[in-house]
């Protein structure tokens, strides 16, 4: 089940919200939300819901053991990390590693075909944040298994994040309120995220899929750039839209998740981009990997290496494909470059700022080409075509012109404009604030109409 579906919007969410609202205590609400979350996950993953429960149970026991036997805390912490990473390795990377081994050695070992559990990267990292917090003695072990299971399985952030660290909502698991103001804020945030996903991401996704599926003979610079820019908007509005919906749902039920995006396409450097893009993931790696490696405390050389390691892991986290690994290393390279040559990202006048912004968007756009393609060869071919000159090949131009519909162009312009922080800038204008109460229901109606029509409705982060 996904948020951008009629069954979620019209049946699941109203039933869960009303049921939770009627319960008088946080304890009863927790139990109800836990059952609802397991149903939500089990709707799409009837078997793997038991994998998630088993993972939570093991992490619950590791944490209790670390607290009860402090002399074995380090050993138990290591075993907990191995167990969580082992789950990821088996279900997400086993087939990829077997293929890679066969390619390198020429052997023919059987390649396991294992269905990927939805959201496994997200709930595994959340579980790891809990055991690592307990290991570092930053939070006490949770005595209630069901409360811990609710933290890991809570449906708003279960399948696509944001990655919520345990210490961020530890208090709200036991003490929170569903206030009218919070509910209203959450509903508006959810609808805005739904609009991002259904109205912008889906439209741009249809364009990107059409162009990326074209044979190589029909790809010229026009097609390549159109596909790259369409996907640039699709992935942002798809993922940030889901994050907005998750944050809005959290508000509705009394939880407050941290922001996951902060207008990344206005960034002036790759470093700035990663402060704004998928903030919960970069924050997780910074807290649980970058700082333990030494961060920037051991000189510039070590800082560069640490960042490279983090972004290699970031790429690997996204999926079992060389394109994801390359994407992570690619971003790591530019972060190293900016660390070695700080003049690249040093602030200056308007012309310098414009050039830095162009550089950042260009780097990010090319990176997402490899993120989108299935193979490195396809990625290199696509980038080559982007910079091969604007040839007017008849077949390629027919394909290019076929996606230049009024709807696609309107959505593209709207997506490009809304990627800048116009809304927060003018939020204090009273009449615009009142207008938003009219616009929000219109967005919901348009989304429901689109979903009712059974239109294209993919979800990129199902792959992760």
Image (cartoon, rainbow, N blue to C red):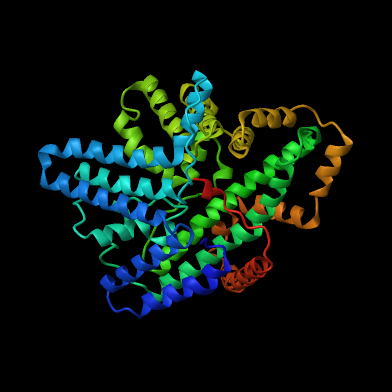
Q: Residue 198's x, y, as percent?
A: 62, 60
Direction from residue 330 to residue 400 in the image, left or right: right
Along the line of sight, the residue nearer the viewer: 60 or 285:
60
Q: Is residue 388 above or below residue 33?
A: above
One can see residue 170 in this view? no
Question: Where is residue 453, by image quadrant?
Answer: bottom right
Question: Where is residue 452, by image quadrant?
Answer: bottom right
Along the line of sight, the residue nearer the viewer: 385 or 463:
463
The residue lying at 79 percent from left, 49 percent from top is 403
Along the line of sight, the residue nearer the viewer: 206 or 287:
206
Direction from residue 67 to residue 374 in the image, left or right: right
Question: Where is residue 264, by image quadrant?
Answer: top right
Q: Residue 141's x, y, as percent?
A: 19, 52
One can see residue 72 in this view? yes
Direction from residue 283 to residue 30 in the image, left or right: left
Q: Residue 136's x, y, as percent?
A: 21, 41
Q: Is residue 81 above or below residue 185?
A: above
Q: Residue 363's x, y, as percent?
A: 60, 32
Direction from residue 305 to residue 10 in the image, left or right: right
- Total marks in image: 0
Q: Is residue 418 above or below residue 6?
A: above
């Amino acid at each position: 089940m996904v948020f951008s579906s009629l069954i979620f919007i019209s049946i699941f969410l109203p039933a869960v919200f009303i049921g939770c609202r009627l319960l008088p205590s946080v304890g009863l609400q927790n139990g109800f939300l836990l059952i609802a979350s397991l149903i939500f996950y089990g709707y799409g993953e009837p078997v793997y819901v038991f994998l998630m429960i088993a993972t939570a149970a093991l992490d619950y026991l590791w944490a209790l053991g670390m607290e009860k036997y402090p002399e074995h805390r380090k050993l138990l912490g290591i075993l907990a990390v191995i167990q969580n990473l082992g789950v990821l390795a088996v279900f997400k990377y086993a087939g990829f590693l077997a293929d890679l081994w066969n390619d390198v050695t020429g052997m023919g070992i059987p390649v396991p075909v294992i269905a990927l559990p939805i959201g496994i990267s997200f709930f595994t990292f959340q579980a790891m944040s809990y055991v690592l917090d307990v290991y570092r003695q930053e939070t006490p072990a949770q005595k209630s298994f069901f409360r811990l299971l609710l933290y890991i399985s809570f449906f708003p952030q279960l399948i696509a994040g944001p990655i919520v660290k345990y210490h961020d909502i530890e208090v709200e698991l036991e003490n929170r309120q569903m206030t009218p103001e919070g509910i209203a804020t959450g509903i508006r945030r959810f609808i805005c995220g739904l609009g991002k996903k259904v109205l912008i991401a889906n439209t741009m996704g249809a364009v990107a899929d059409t162009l990326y599926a074209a044979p190589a003979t029909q790809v010229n610079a026009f097609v390549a750039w159109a596909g790259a820019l369409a996907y640039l908007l699709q992935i942002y509005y798809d993922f940030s839209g889901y994050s907005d919906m998750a944050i809005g749902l959290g508000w509705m039920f009394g939880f407050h998740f941290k922001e996951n995006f902060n207008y990344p396409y206005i960034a002036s450097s790759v470093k700035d981009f990663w402060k704004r893009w998928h903030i919960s993931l970069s924050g997780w790696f910074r807290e649980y990997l970058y700082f333990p490696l030494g961060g920037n405390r051991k000189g510039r050389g070590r800082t560069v290496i640490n960042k490279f390691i983090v972004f290699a892991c970031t790429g690997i986290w996204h999926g079992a494909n060389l394109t994801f690994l390359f994407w992570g290393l690619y971003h790591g390279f530019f972060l190293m470059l900016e660390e070695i040559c700080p003049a690249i990202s040093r602030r200056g006048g308007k012309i310098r700022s414009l050039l830095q912004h162009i550089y950042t968007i260009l780097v990010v756009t090319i990176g997402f080409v490899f993120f989108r393609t299935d193979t490195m060869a396809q990625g290199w071919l696509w980038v080559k075509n982007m910079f091969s000159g604007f040839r007017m090949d008849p077949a390629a131009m027919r394909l290019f012109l076929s996606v230049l519909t009024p709807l696609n162009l309107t959505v593209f312009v709207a997506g490009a404009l809304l990627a800048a922080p116009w809304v927060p800038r003018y939020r204090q204008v009273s009449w615009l604030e009142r207008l938003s109460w009219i616009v929000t229901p219109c967005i919901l109606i348009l989304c429901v109409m689109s979903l009712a029509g059974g239109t294209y409705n993919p979800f990129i982060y199902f792959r992760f």
